[in-house]
Image (tube, rainbow, N blue to C red):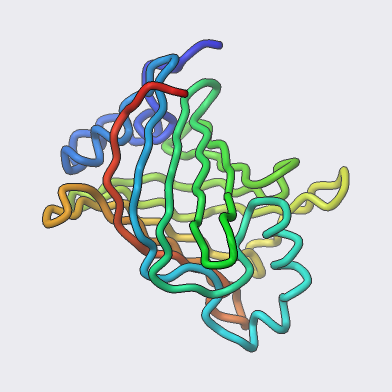
């Protein structure tokens, strides 16, 4: 398996990579073969806060949870572990250590032209999104430009007026000596349907 000389995010940033805090630049460095990037931290909040939205979108959210794409509930102060590997893009597993048992979200990111990345989430790539990637104030920011869902063998792209708006910010946490991550997903007319925010420390280790 070939390893890209840069991670998809670093490729998308180009010269903007130098604007990131050193913690973020280290996080975006390629992971060598036989190694894995491992992070341990705590999500202060994760899931869908609104009970009304959870009722309305419950069947959809539960399918996405079973497919390893989106956590359908709401939880606070949740320990989590992230494991990153590089190959054809960057794959990630984020495991939430919930009181009812572990749950893992999986995704794979690859670079696209013009400062963008494509992210495919869950089993059989049930969700997909394209993001613009920028650096500002030492932080990495992703904003979605296209979002789609796969139903069976059919992929459906949401029209722009109805598409979820996904925003992710990775920033340094100097007190922790690590980094902070915050993601929000907002849908027109419904509001916020998913979010997570937390801090973690990250190192490159031997892949067991």
Residue 114 seen in the figure: yes
Q: Provide residue 142's location: percent of width, then percent of height.
A: 41, 51
Does 58 sit above or below residue 5? below
Q: Residue at x 71, y 83 (%)?
A: 55
Q: Residue furthest right?
A: 153
Q: Residue at x 50, y 56 (%)?
A: 96
In this picture, residue 17 sits left or right of residue 7? left
When asked about the image quadrant of residue 123, the answer is top right
In this picture, residue 107 sits left or right of residue 31? right
Residue nearest the observer in this picture, 143 or 152:
152
Does 25 sit above or below residue 100? above
Q: Quadrant of the N terminus?
A: top right
Q: Provide residue 166's location: percent of width, then percent of height.
A: 50, 61
Residue nearest the observer in this picture, 138 or 42:
42
Q: Provide residue 180's location: percent of width, then percent of height.
A: 28, 56
Q: Residue at x 87, y 43 (%)?
A: 153
Q: Residue at x 42, y 64 (%)?
A: 78
Q: Residue furthest top?
A: 2
Q: Residue furthest left?
A: 175
In this picture, residue 32 sits left or right of residue 21? right
When asked about the image quadrant of residue 33, the answer is top left
Residue nearest the observer in this picture, 129 or 44:
44
Q: Provide residue 27's location: percent of width, then percent of height.
A: 30, 36
Residue 111 seen in the figure: no
Does 28 sit above or below residue 147? above
């Amino acid at each position: 398996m070939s390893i890209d000389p840069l991670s998809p995010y670093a490729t998308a940033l180009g010269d903007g990579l130098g604007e990131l805090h050193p913690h973020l630049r280290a996080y975006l460095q390629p992971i060598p073969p036989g190694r894995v990037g491992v992070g341990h931290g705590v999500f202060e909040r994760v899931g869908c806060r609104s009970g009304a939205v959870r009722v309305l979108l419950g069947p959809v959210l539960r399918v996405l949870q079973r497919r390893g794409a989106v956590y359908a509930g709401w939880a606070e102060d949740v320990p989590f572990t992230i494991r990153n590997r590089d190959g054809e893009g960057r794959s990630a597993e984020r495991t939430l250590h919930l009181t009812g048992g572990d749950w893992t979200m999986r995704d794979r990111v690859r670079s696209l032209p013009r400062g963008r990345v494509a992210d495919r989430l869950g089993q059989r790539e049930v969700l997909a999104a394209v993001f613009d990637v920028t650096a500002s104030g030492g932080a990495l920011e992703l904003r979605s430009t296209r979002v789609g869902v796969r139903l069976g063998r059919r992929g459906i792209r949401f029209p722009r007026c109805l598409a979820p708006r996904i925003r992710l910010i990775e920033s340094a946490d100097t007190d922790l000596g690590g980094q902070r991550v915050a993601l929000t997903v907002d849908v027109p007319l419904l509001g916020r349907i998913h979010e997570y925010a937390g801090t973690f420390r990250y190192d490159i280790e031997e892949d067991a």
